[in-house]
Amino acid sequence: MASESSAERDRLAFYLTVTRAVMAAACLAFQLFLAPVGSHLVTAAMGVYALSSFFAVTKRFGFRGTWGRLTLCIDGVFFMVLASFGAPEAVWLAPLFYLYLLAAAVSMYGAREVALIAVACTLFFATNAHPGPQYVLRETILVASAFSVAYALQKSRLQKRVDELAERADQLRLAAETARESEQQRIAADFHDGPLQLMISFQMRLEILRKLFEKSREAGMEELAQLQEISRTLVRDLRTFVRTMRPLDVDGAGLSAATRRLVEEFQKESGIPITFVGGDRPFSAAPETCTDVLQMIREALNNVRKHAKATRVAVALEKVGKILEVSVDDNGVGFPFSGTYSLDELELLRMGPVSLKRRARSLGAEMLLESRPGRGAGLKLKIPI
């Protein structure tokens, strides 16, 4: 993208350089054939300017840096000389050259350079008492200068906005990459702690089963029954894992219904009774926010199933003003720590589920995690929508 923009700028600079050379040659031709006899110095100056313009084309000198600004100033001085001392019959070339001058300033530079050229030329023609053709150009100079400055200011504002949007896009791209990496880490951790551990256990039990059958058929049959239970658990965990990989797509109007379906599936798979309380009235929220909220509830329930050893879970979802309040409570074993901690405290102490903390931070949510060892745990979120 940057290389394409630079190439377009180089092409535009080349076209402007060619235009200047053509106009300089035209001005010199009119001056040679139509100028008064006593204007040799002006004619010589125009000749030098025309030669330097053709030299700039052949060497591809563009409007870059200090050289470009110096070229712009020289063009401005040439315009003043042309309008003040050029052949009267060629006065129509002066406004064309001024339009070229403004176009070069607007295209290649910012509002400061445009204003400098416009103000300098306007003041020159307003204060110059030389009785030449410049008098008929004053109105043209004034109007063209005003429009060019206004356009340059608008262009500067738009360019600033484009730069801000580009920076924002880069930030979003970086955030998306970070989220993708974090999600990959979460998936790897979930798979390692769940299905993979069961597979390793299953493999070890198979080896034990083989040895038991060699010694005692009854002991082998008992071990085989345990392997069947591990197999059922493995299938259930794999189904749960696959379900957590499915994309979530929900808006504010369907968040309550989607949460209800989620808790029903959780109860069916885990066998843990679960109570859901949620407002049935739809509310307005960004689909991305609703998706993250539902994902957080799903992750909290998965943590309950894997670690809490709970026999009862309660999920509540309620909109209060512009805040969405979410809570997940269980009567399991709780976390190793005791007490209630905010998101900042959890991050400072490096406690609590990492994925939930990350999502809460990205949503700008308030998060409270209460741990009651031996009596359960509670997660409370206040999410601005």
Image (spheres, helix red, strand yellow):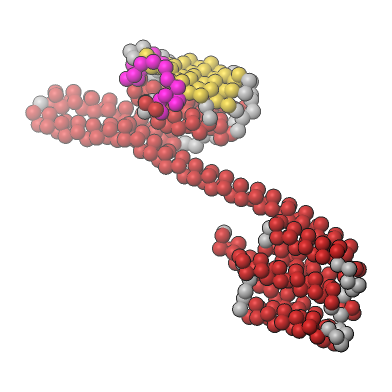
Task: Give the x, y percent position of residue 234.
Answer: 32, 30
The residue at the point 70 percent across, 68 percent down is 72
- Image quadrant holding the C terminus, namely top right
Q: Nearer the viewer, residue 192 or 274?
A: 192
Q: Nearer the viewer, residue 317 or 92?
A: 92
Task: Give the x, y percent position of residue 148.
Answer: 78, 59
The residue at the point 39 percent across, 33 percent down is 241
Q: 261 above or below 38? A: above
| Residue 205 seen in this snapshot | yes
Q: 52 above or below 224? A: below
The residue at the point 87 percent across, 75 percent down is 91
- Image quadrant holding the N terminus, namely bottom right
* Residue 343, magenta (yes or no): yes
Q: Is residue 251 left or right of residue 228?
A: right
Q: Is residue 138 left or right of residue 118?
A: right
Q: Nearer the viewer, residue 26 or 310?
A: 26
For the magenta stretch, what is the residue range? 330-347
Q: Is residue 280 left or right of residue 207?
A: right
* Residue 364, magenta (yes or no): no
The residue at the point 35 percent across, 38 percent down is 188
Displayed quadrant of residue 110? bottom right
Q: Is residue 45 left or right of residue 234?
A: right
| Residue 140 seen in this snapshot | no
Q: 225 above or below 41? A: above
Task: Give the x, y percent position of residue 367.
Answer: 48, 23
Displayed quadrant of residue 70? bottom right
Task: Give the x, y percent position of residue 185.
Answer: 38, 39
Q: 273 above or below 349? A: above
Total labels: the figure holds 0
